[in-house]
Amino acid sequence: MTPPTLKLSLACLGMILLTGCSFAPTRAPVEDRELARLPQPGTDATAVAAPDESAVIVTPYPGASGAQAATPLPESAAPQPFESAPPSTAVIALLDTATQQTRAGKLDTAAATLERALRLEPRNPELWTRLAEIRLQQGDYEQAASLAAKSNNLAGNNTGLISRNMKIIEQARNRKGAVKKPG
Amino acid sequence: MAARPPRNKPRASRALGPWARLTLYALFALVVVGAPYVAYLDYTVRTQFEGKRWALPARVYARPLELFQGLNLTAEQLSQELVNLGYVNTARPETPGTFARMPNGLRFVTRSFRFWDGPESSVSVQAEFDGGIVRTLRDPAGGTAVDLVRLDPLLIGSIYPSHHEDRVLVQISEVPPLLVKMLIAIEDRHYYAHHGIDPFSILRAMWVNLRAGSTVQGGSTLTQQLVKNFYLSAERTLWRKLNEALMSLLLEAHYSKDEILEAYLNEIFLGQDGKRAIHGFGLASQFYFNRPLTELKPEHFALLVGLVRGASFYDPRRHPKRALALRNTIFDTLATEGVLGTQEAASAKAAGLGVTSRAPSGVSPYPAFMDLVRRQLQRDYKEEDLTSEGLQIFTTLDPRIQDHLDHALSTRITQLEKQYRIPARKLEGAALVTRTENGEVLAIVGGRDTRYSGFNRALDAQRPIGSLVKPAVYLTALMQPQKYTLATQLDDSPLTVKNPGGKVWTPSNYDHEYRGPVALHTALAQSLNVATARLGIEVGIPNVLNTLKKLGIERTIPPYPSMLLGAVELAPIEVAQMYQALASGGFQTPLRAIREVLTAKGEPLQHYGLSIKQVFDPAPVFLVTSAMQEVASMGTARSLYTQIPASLAIAGKTGTTDDLRDSWFAGFSGQHLMVAWMGRDDNRPIGLTGASGALRVWGDTISRIGTQPLRPAPPANITTVALDAATHLRAGPGCGEVVQLPFIAGSAPQELAPCAHQQGNPLSRFLKNIF
């Protein structure tokens, strides 16, 4: 917390104590700093009335590792393993269906089935890879590469899947190059 | 197609007497004059019957609800979904479209339905719920687990041709035989015996009418009725009667009884809904009973058969007594004719009309969403195809989320108007909800009157976006990890910029205070204008514009410095497109309202597949997302967590424009992205900031729809480092207030904070804890 903000917060607190005021934001140029985080009659904003940031000692940063920092603080080397819950039976069933549809050459239908599975488990990297593989087969190289990259983004330390994705990206690049060559 | 004259051509013969010869000449003359006319009628009959018989409106469906173990859904929500689909609550659900409540769940039988990826057959399911989650899905007979259940989708609208004739085609094979039997018994007893006209029935009708002194009975066969409706005008002349008879004979000569009956079942007029004319038994079944024909009972069939006689006179919603009397007379006739047993007829007579109190409206309850669907369809289809081909459009709309959004926006606007003394009915709003991972639009509201299909603000109101633009500025900076990190100290001191035109621009902060040096993540979380403007100028306005383009903003934005603080006019849907790229980790994902299009017969026509494009390296997107999470946890949107649990870890940004004219909030969870806007159509100040206006609707909606927390996947090159909060240098044991920030590997500050050199002792830590 920077000192000016602290001062401001204390001033706010003081004003509340003295006047019980609820100050509406004053007119100002483009800005939306919500000074008026104070209770406004009839709103549900009361719970954040106290400017209490000075009480924060350790501020676990959202999105970052939640480890408490008390001792010498090196960079935490590896990111946490990313959620790797086993896929649900519904997704397994859809994956089976997609496999059959792919074997039968119904690639569009298989893609639709995988999209259905992705609606159930959008963060299942396997599903993104499978969709990438279908787009590769269909000759949609840009989609294939993007979908594989998306899977990589979610794959955590699933090295097997990551190397599958890298292969897709490489093949997509090669074939796209081959297509673009004249003749 | 060659027209064929009648087959029974008279043959000339010399061995005839003079009278016979005269007759022959007369006949010959008749053939010469009449044959071309008959040929013409024959041609008309066949081309119209064999061509496209009706202009069928496109049907627009919501997303089908898919049930699986672990889904966030309560028994009440499922029950409501089934009721909306017209499922009937019965003690023992055994036929499609029925359900029953059980102690901890529901038992129901789904309807079969043809989807893009194939037919879904009807299944019997027992669903058990626990703590707002689907616990088990089983087959009630064998008890075996069911992996996935897909319900039929809710019809949310149709795209009508200009004459507003509406119908749902049925095939003769899928029409319940009892309905056909009843229809024939009541309207045309000799249907299967005659050749288009029924002399006996005409004679009988004449006799009855003579006795009554007026026309009380018609002698028309079903074929004649079809011809009358399908080919002829409504005038009642002898000439038309003659045409009707001739055409009926011709129709019967060419087509089978079943083909003619099928056409009849689809053609006949059975009701009126405002401008919309209800034709055919398929649509009438939906219109009166909110169920497909196959799910109706004898009492429903009898009513529909009765409506053939006069759909407005016997309208069961306006004249229920009249309709009931007619239906029961029909049952008497059916009993006399032996179609139903006396017992059966008597018990059917005891049943109520069973008509739903309100007709399912032909006007979509979701006009803003339908508007988006139409616009997306018009890229690929001609208007004429949409109103005549009977296309089936499968959309992404989630009716449950849409209903919550409608309700949240309209009630919150009314409440804010009172609270902030805004003149009544002046405050407007718009909002939309999408899925973060695939860009599907789940719900959209275009104004405070959510059922009113007027100005669609979500798509068409271009308003300055204010601070919503800031994440683009910070993302541009964070893409250069060697120069900018979340810990970089920005300069929030007075700034004056000369515009290309020579005009001077002096941005100021909302509270007119300057923070001096301030950490980059704090500047975004607290939405500091001056620090942001200076940062934007440092990284280069063209680079920020390029980031916006990559985020999916197609519009050309003038490269003035004021754009850095949101002097950019966008519609809510464009903002959603922009934030979609952040929510999906740096992948541009076009917003889609349509999944698939099928032909009227259920053949797949077009699949609007998921398409993504990586436009940013995931690491800087991860960093800017972290700072946007701070907006909600500690920044300008922190009042959000009075409405929803802080564990959802929402990333978002508030936006407010000059003189409080526009109130914006755009943010996302792990599952949903929502953008909300409030303002006035006349662009006058509303006195609301992003947090006091749009953020409230945002919280109202998200708190009700149930969503997953945001846990962005950290890219492999992200590390987390603890810093001294005051200096944003490396923290050590002696440091009291510490922040943990993510960094792209190698970019974290190396220098130790002064406090890191001190040995932390319990007393000083205790004192720091107090202050």
Image: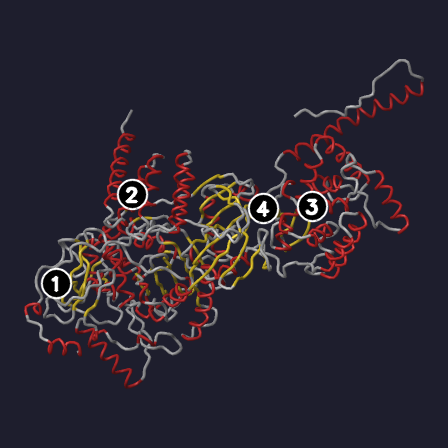
Q: Amino acid at mark 3?
A: Ile
Q: Amino acid at mark 4?
A: Pro
Residue assigned mark 2: A148
Indicate which label's residue lies in the foreground, 2 or 4.
2
**In 3D space, how far apart are the residues under numbered discs 4 and 3 (Cα atoms)?**
18 Å
Mark 3 packing: few (<14 Cα in 10 Å), some, or many (20+)? many
On the image, the x and y values in percent for residue B524 come to 24, 63
Q: In the structure shown, which secondary structural element does the residue marked by tag 3 occupy?
A: loop
Q: Are marks 2 and 3 on the same chain?
A: no
On the image, the x and y values in percent for residue B170 come to 62, 43
Q: In the structure shown, which secondary structural element does the residue marked by tag 4 occupy?
A: loop
Residue B370 at least partly seen: no
The answer to which of B108 and B81 lies nearer the viewer is: B108
**In 3D space, how far apart are the residues under numbered discs 2 and 4 (Cα atoms)?**
44 Å
Residue at (85%, 45%) from the top-left corner? B205
**In 3D space, how far apart are the residues under numbered discs 2 and 1 (Cα atoms)?**
35 Å
**In 3D space, how far apart are the residues under numbered discs 2 and 3 (Cα atoms)?**
55 Å
Q: Is residue B514 left or right of residue B665?
A: left
Where's the N terminus of chain B, which quadrant? top right
Q: In the structure shown, which secondary structural element does the residue marked by tag 2 occupy?
A: helix
Q: Amino acid at mark 1?
A: Leu
Residue assigned mark 4: B161
Q: Is residue A90 left or right of residue B209?
A: left
Q: Is residue B217 left or right of residue B584?
A: right
